[in-house]
Image (cartoon, helix red, strand yellow):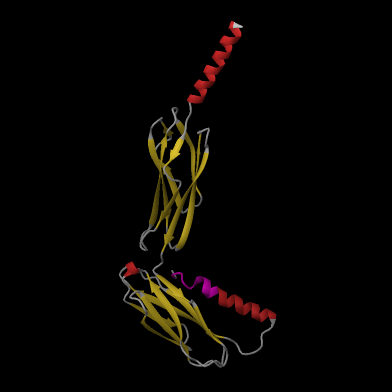
Amino acid sequence: MNTNFSRLIGVLALAALVQSARAELKWEQTSVDLRPAFNDKQAVAHFKYENVGNTPVHFKSVHASCGCTTAQTQNEQVAPGQKGEITATFNIGGRTGTQVKTVTVQTDDPERSSIVLTLKAVITPLLEFQPTLVYWQNGEEPKPKIITAKANKDAAIKKLDVSSSTPDFTAKVDPGSASNEFRISVQPRDTTKAVYATLTIKPDSPANTGNMFSAAARVMPSAPASKSTLSTIRHDLATPAATAASPSQ
């Protein structure tokens, strides 16, 4: 009995020792929201951690979700009580809107060997347009229609220059309801024939490096359209609307 009891005590002691010897990374936050300025080239997130266990933690891999994002850790090994951070750098390029990038971290932490860190960047473009396409039905009265351009408040845009790809449309720019808004008044010369034009918009801003933006204007065809023709028209209308707010290179 004494021998068995001694063995039991030994097993319990060993189990307690193994349980107490643990590695554990505690993260300050696993998701970071950023709002870079419109002329920033990069958005950088810092994910801080601490080893709250009593054995070292080793990083096996740190992998970003796409080529536009890089991630680095300060240490390959984190000692008990040691703090550090993983830095994720997102190269903005010409991207706008909400961008979500992730970094997958693999460690030998037995409690949490894999973790996903999330960087969310909301990038306000230099200019936003609503709508990006104005159009008239065949025979409709050729009254002006308005495209509202909203400029980034930090861009200090004072005026917009707008030109049409064809003489079938004219464009005039007036101040909008706010200091950073402009009203682009677009008017067809007539609506008796189908015509399409690209409106090239150039902002006058110290921050602009020569990029130009596009919107579209169209007079619809008069003849009843077959299903295939209607499909083509819808495709043509959708294409400029999807790309008009992006700067041309």
| Residue at 51% across, 50% down | 65
Instruction: Determine if residue 138 is in view.
Output: yes
Residue 133, above or below 99:
below
- Quadrant of the image occupied by residue 199: bottom left
Give whichever of 85, 70 is nearer the camera. 85
Residue 145 at x, y = what percent? 47, 85
- Quadrant of the image occupied by residue 156: bottom left
Instruction: Determine if residue 167 is in view.
Output: no
The quadrant of the rendering that contains the N terminus is top right
- Residue 40 in the magenta stretch? The answer is no
Residue 51, above or below 136:
above
| Residue at 56% across, 77% down | 237
Left or right of 66 on screen, residue 44: left
Give whichever of 191, 24 is nearer the camera. 24
| Residue at 40% across, 50% down | 45
Residue 98 at x, y = what percent? 46, 60
Give whichever of 177, 118 is nearer the camera. 177
Which residues lie in the magenta part?
Answer: 239-247
Residue 169 at x, y = what percent? 47, 87
Residue 79 at x, y = what percent? 41, 30
| Residue at 54% across, 14% down | 10
Residue sitting farthest toward the top: 2
